Image (tube, helix red, strand yellow):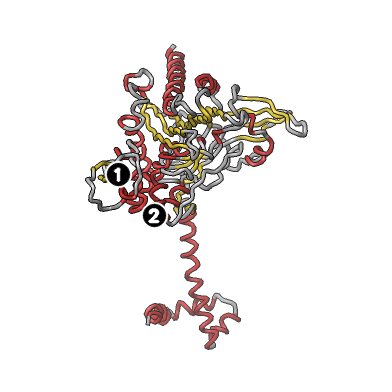
């Protein structure tokens, strides 16, 4: 019955348009017209005619899809392509413009094979000469801001730390401005690209973003919790409990990093599939293209609901991340939800002075919607103003430099399995209130027996140094223009 209902209008249309059909037959070769006269030939002709009618519609639909930019499928999330109207860069940002058909003479993969990644550990200059294994000479220009890099190298305290990994990045372009590290066991190691560090509460960024999109949460959404803020017992994860519950907003629960709130979101609102989806959208379990080897951040989610709570709250040691990846996650919050491919090499020239590699701005994917990124921006600012980073940024509103900025972040801390190190995280950003300048900072410190400089403290002094230089240069340029 269903097929008859569908085909009746078509048959009726054919009866009403016999003259039109005859005209179409006249345009066909004689063999086709002859076939249409018989029983089988007539049915065949009808099918050909239907296809001829459908083809123009399919062609128009394809053109519309092609002109609108199409969509890219990424881990079951539909990701819109980047358009020229929705710019990533402000007019003041500096980046090399390249033609669309531009192709580097060598790829990033070949750059990784060409250069020794150990060279990039604690660079003190923004360029250097390099001799390959087959005695070819190359000149490398990096994205490193030497003023910022050397400043943090001098400030880095290794006396109480087992590991230090600090990355500063331009969120517009993905250019690494500073990359400083210390490995107690390997002097030539680069902790900034190492994925050995538990993500801890930094993963709450992913969980909160997923809840905003999937559950319609906003900063003021009302949630509940019981017990202490930084524990995660199964009794705290029940939807209904006999214990006294406290009400709290998503903003405050994120700022104060309340484990049970995010654990309950992981179990009752998101579940395994959504947690996995958003983790991968933010770059976990994914090889991110970079000029030097970058270990992929790792996440693994079982079918056990309590495990979902551990993942969502960051209350586990198995979800690991590199400091460089932490900077990319912070960049997505400032870039309307987009991840940007990181860059540390601007260009490479051979011994004849020819450019054999040139970096370019490369968007990776749309991790979250622009709306979700705006809410995340608000949550991360609350962490600085009234949350776990409040003490480290105390008095910043009265500081001559920091008071001109909007600052946001997320802290995290967890002990190693052997209890011989305490991992301390800060992932965040600073943006000019009356301008376009922005920077993201990602820092992890593995404290030993004693607690030294905290990750958030490094972030504060880095932000102040960067914008002190920026405002000074801006004032100098303004004076030159006025003179």
Q: Nearer the viewer, residue 419 or 314?
A: 419
Q: Residues within 10 Å of mark 1 (few under 14, many from 20)?
A: many
Q: Residues within 10 Å of mark 2 (few under 14, many from 20)?
A: some
- Residue 29 point in image, percent of width and height: 59, 77
Is residue 390 visible in this depiction of the protein?
yes
Q: Nearer the viewer, residue 387 or 213?
A: 387
163 on left or right of 398:
right
Q: Which residue is mark 2?
A: 305
Name the N-terminal-most of marks 1 and 2: 1
Instruction: Say which element carries label 1.
Output: loop
468 on left or right of 359:
left
As measured in the structure, the alpha-carbon distance from the residue carrying label 1 to the one carrying label 2 is 24 Å
- Residue 350 point in image, percent of width and height: 71, 31
Q: Is residue 77 above or below residue 361?
A: below
Res 470 label: none
Q: Residue furthest bottom?
A: 39
Residue drawn at x 42%, y 35% is: 413
Residue drawn at x 33%, y 53% is: 268
Q: Which residue is mark 1?
A: 218
Q: Nearer the viewer, residue 119 or 34?
A: 119
| Quarter the C terminus occupies | top left
Residue drawn at x 46%, y 33% is: 422
- Residue 1 point in image, percent of width and height: 37, 83
From the image, state whether disc 1 or disc 2 is nearer to you: 2
Q: Nearer the viewer, residue 60 or 166?
A: 166
Q: Quadrant of residue 372?
A: top left
């Amino acid at each position: 019955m269903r097929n008859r209902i569908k085909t009746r209008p078509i048959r009726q249309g054919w009866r009403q348009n016999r003259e039109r059909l005859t005209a179409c037959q006249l345009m066909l070769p004689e063999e086709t017209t002859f076939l249409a006269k018989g029983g089988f030939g007539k049915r065949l002709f009808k099918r050909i005619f239907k296809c001829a009618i459908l083809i123009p519609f399919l062609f128009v639909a394809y053109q519309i899809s092609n002109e609108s930019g199409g969509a890219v499928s990424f881990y079951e999330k539909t990701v819109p392509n980047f358009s020229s109207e929705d710019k990533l860069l402000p007019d003041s940002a500096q980046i090399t413009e390249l033609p669309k058909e531009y192709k580097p003479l060598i790829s990033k993969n070949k750059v990784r094979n060409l250069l020794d990644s150990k060279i990039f550990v604690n660079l003190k200059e923004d360029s250097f000469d390099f001799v390959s294994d087959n005695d070819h000479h190359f000149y490398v220009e990096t994205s490193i801001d030497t003023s910022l890099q050397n400043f943090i190298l001098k400030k880095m305290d290794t006396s109480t730390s087992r590991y230090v990994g600090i990355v500063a990045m331009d969120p517009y372009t993905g250019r690494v401005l500073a990359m400083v590290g210390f490995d107690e066991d390997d002097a030539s190691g680069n902790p900034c690209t190492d994925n050995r560090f538990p993500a801890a509460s930094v993963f709450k960024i992913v969980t909160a973003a997923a809840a905003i999109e999937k559950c319609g949460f906003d900063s003021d959404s009302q949630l509940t919790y019981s017990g202490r803020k930084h524990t995660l017992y199964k009794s705290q994860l029940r939807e209904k409990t006999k214990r006294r519950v406290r009400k709290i907003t998503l903003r405050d629960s994120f700022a104060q990093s309340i484990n049970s709130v995010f654990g309950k979101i992981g179990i009752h609102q998101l579940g395994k599939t959504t947690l996995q989806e958003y983790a991968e959208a933010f770059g976990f379990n994914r090889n991110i293209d970079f000029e030097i080897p970058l270990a992929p951040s790792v996440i693994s989610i079982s079918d056990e609901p309590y495990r979902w709570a551990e993942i969502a709250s960051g209350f586990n040691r198995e979800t690991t991340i590199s400091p460089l990846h932490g900077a990319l996650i912070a960049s997505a919050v400032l870039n309307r939800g987009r991840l940007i491919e990181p860059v540390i090499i601007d260009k490479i020239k051979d011994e004849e002075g020819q450019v054999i590699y040139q970096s370019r701005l490369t968007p990776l994917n749309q991790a979250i919607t622009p709306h979700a990124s705006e809410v995340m921006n608000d949550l991360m600012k609350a962490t600085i103003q009234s949350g776990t980073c409040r003490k480290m940024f105390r008095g910043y509103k009265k500081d001559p430099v920091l008071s001109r900025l909007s600052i946001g972040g997320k802290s995290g801390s967890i002990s190693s399995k052997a209890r011989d190190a305490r991992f301390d995280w800060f992932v965040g950003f600073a943006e000019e209130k009356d301008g376009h300048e922005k920077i993201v900072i990602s820092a992890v410190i593995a404290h030993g027996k004693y607690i030294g400089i905290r990750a958030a403290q490094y972030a504060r002094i880095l932000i102040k140094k960067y914008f002190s230089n920026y405002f000074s240069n801006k004032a100098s340029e303004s004076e030159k223009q006025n003179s």
